[in-house]
Amino acid sequence: MERFIQLVIDGIAIGSIYGALALALVLIFRSTGIVNFAQGEMAMFSTFGAWALVQAGLPLGLALLLALAGSFVGGMVIERVIIRPVEGGTRCRS
């Protein structure tokens, strides 16, 4: 029974991550009309950044906050430099 409960908790955690990434895709598409398939890469980059900070000796909480801040700044730069110039172009809508 203990193993079953652990598997249910793991499944909920993994499903929550998939749901958050799906919501991010929908949010970007609904606001810009552009499908951004780089969401997964951005999440992976943030995760590895937090992992590297933990490996460098920072406490987990501080590493997560720094990774979140870095991801926020990186997302803003990508939006301004890449997405915004493309946003005004022709769109394929069905």
Image (cartoon, rainbow, N blue to C red):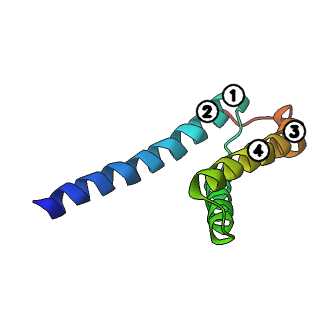
Question: What whole-number distance in Å separates the C-alpha atoms at marks 2 and 1?
Answer: 6 Å
Asked whether disc 4 touches disc 3, contact meaning CB atoms under 8 Å apart, the reply is: no
Disc 4 marks a residue whose amino acid type is: Gly
Q: Which amino acid does label 1 sit on?
A: Ser
The residues bearing labels 4 and 3 have C-alpha atoms spaced at a distance of 9 Å
Q: Earlier in the sequence, mark 3 or mark 2?
A: 2
> Residue beneath label 2, please?
27
Q: For the residue marked with disc 2, what is the amino acid?
A: Leu
Q: Residue 80 carries which label?
A: 3
Answer whether labels 1 and 3 touch (C-beta < 8 Å).
no
Mark 4 surroundings: few (<14), some (14-19) or many (≥20) residues within 10 A: some
Q: In which quarter of the image is the C terminus?
A: top right
- Can you give x and y, in whole percent of width and height, for residue 49 in the image? 69, 62
The quarter of the picture where the N terminus appears is bottom left
Q: Mark 1 points at which residue?
A: 31
Q: Is mark 2 on a helix, strand or loop?
A: helix
